[in-house]
Image (spheres, helix red, strand yellow):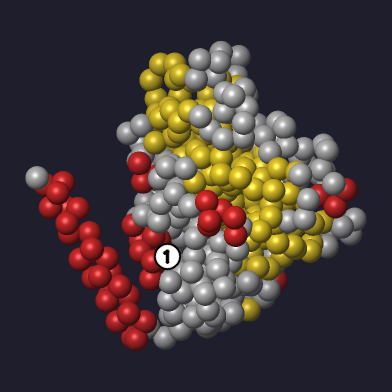
Amino acid sequence: MRFIKALAALPFILIALIVVSFLVTKVIPGLEISSYQVLFNSLTDKGIGTPSPSQLKVLLPAKGFQVTLFADNIPNARMLKITPDGKLLVSSPSKGTIYLLGDQNKNGKADSTIPLITGLNRPHGIDLYHDNHNDWLYIAENHAIGRIAVDWKRGKTVGDYHRLITDLPTGGNHWTKTLRFGPDGWLYLTGGSSCNVCEETDKRRATMMRFRPDGSGGHIYASGLRNSVGFDWAPWDNSLYATDNGRDLLGDDFPPDELNRIQQNGFYGWPYINGFGRLDPKHGLEKEALLNSSIAPNFGFKAHNAPLGIHFLRYDHRPKNYQRSALVALHGSWNRSVPDGYKVISLHWDAQGKITSRDFLSNFLQNDNHIIGRPVDIEEGPDGSIYISDDYAGAVYRVLSK
């Protein structure tokens, strides 16, 4: 009975959110709403459901590639990771679950969806680690980093889930935690700010941290990163790059979102500096000296495009123009008068390190501003398949060469 009452209340909750959002836009200067449906998605982790065949047909992959639907009915599908035997892990924060997707008949569509581990606190980042005893699955929850041993051949966990760290900062605007193991064997973790723009009391907010695999030795690796959801290492020189979402309420076109080359002990500007050396109108007052010590972005995305996952392509048999490249998921704007983003782009590094961009998978934003998906993360399979998660449609797409 309680469930039925809660279900019946959902439309009224949505209406209330929209009304409140409309009123807020009238009293907060600089705030625009791109899509109330997307705003509802952002606030509640609720999407639109499985993409229809007609919606899938309108997606536009880059020349030489094709896109198919690999899996649907994965609520709030976020971060991805390929297992040693070629299956795909997907985190679902809203369900508190890590799913294991398999394609046993090798037809390019998942034929098994197994909840590998459940009962988690908004799990987001996932990665794998092997030591002398076990194959481990590491999980970044809202408040914790945990791990569990997995028998990948059987597709089952072994033993109990153990939280190595349990006191990560929570609350506020940016709740996600993303983790990955680096080439140096350390575990890297990003966590966003508690606010749009402020001076944090907990210095671990808006940073990248680093830990040993057992959870010890934790320290802040880089700071001034407002909301870096995705990061990866360039395979040609092991440089670490992270996406970052710029602050709101300074108009449609400022500040740019960022791609930063992360250096140990580096400071990347937030909350005092926006984009390429512009002092914040409030928090940047009398902070001119920081312009000399902060590190500017390597690349700027359009404001409010919300770059999330980044993945450097490692498959050896890509076309030459994808040899030094990465894919970035632009989740799309929720607070821009004209919606923008909602696609996956490719970034290309030339010999001098200059970065250019091209569309890789687009048209999630239709010509009438109708939104059919919001890309989140990218992963690459051993056969060169590229997997892209979509938390708005609860889906995973597969992109492969024609």
Q: Is residue 155 above or below residue 146?
A: above
Q: Secondary structure at mark 1?
A: helix
User: Residue 385: where, in percent of width, then height?
Assistant: 68, 38
Whether residue 298 is visible here, answered yes or no, is no
Q: Nearer the viewer, residue 325 or 228?
A: 325
Where on the picture, by quarter, is residue 83? top right
Residue occupying the far right of the picture: 351
Q: Nearer the viewer, residue 215 or 287?
A: 215
Looking at the image, the residue that sits furthest to the front is 54
Residue shown at 22%/59% (left/top)? 10
Q: Give whichever of 281, 55 is nearer the camera.
A: 55
Residue 82 % position (x, y): 60, 32
178 left or right, relative to 65: left
| Residue drawn where x is 82% and y is 56% of the image | 349
Q: Which amino acid, mark 1?
A: Val
Alpha-carbon neighbours of circle 1 within 10 Å: few (<14), some, or many (≥20)? many
Residue 295, placed above or below residue 61: below
**Which of 79 and 238 lies nearest the eye of the viewer?**
79
Determine whether, in the image, residue 229 is placed left or right of residue 321. left
Q: Residue furthest left?
A: 1
Which residue in the protein does label 1 denote? Answer: 38
Counting from the top left corner in percent of width and height, residue 342 is at: 56, 63
| Residue 237 appears in the rendering | yes
Residue at image point 83% right, 38% down: 317
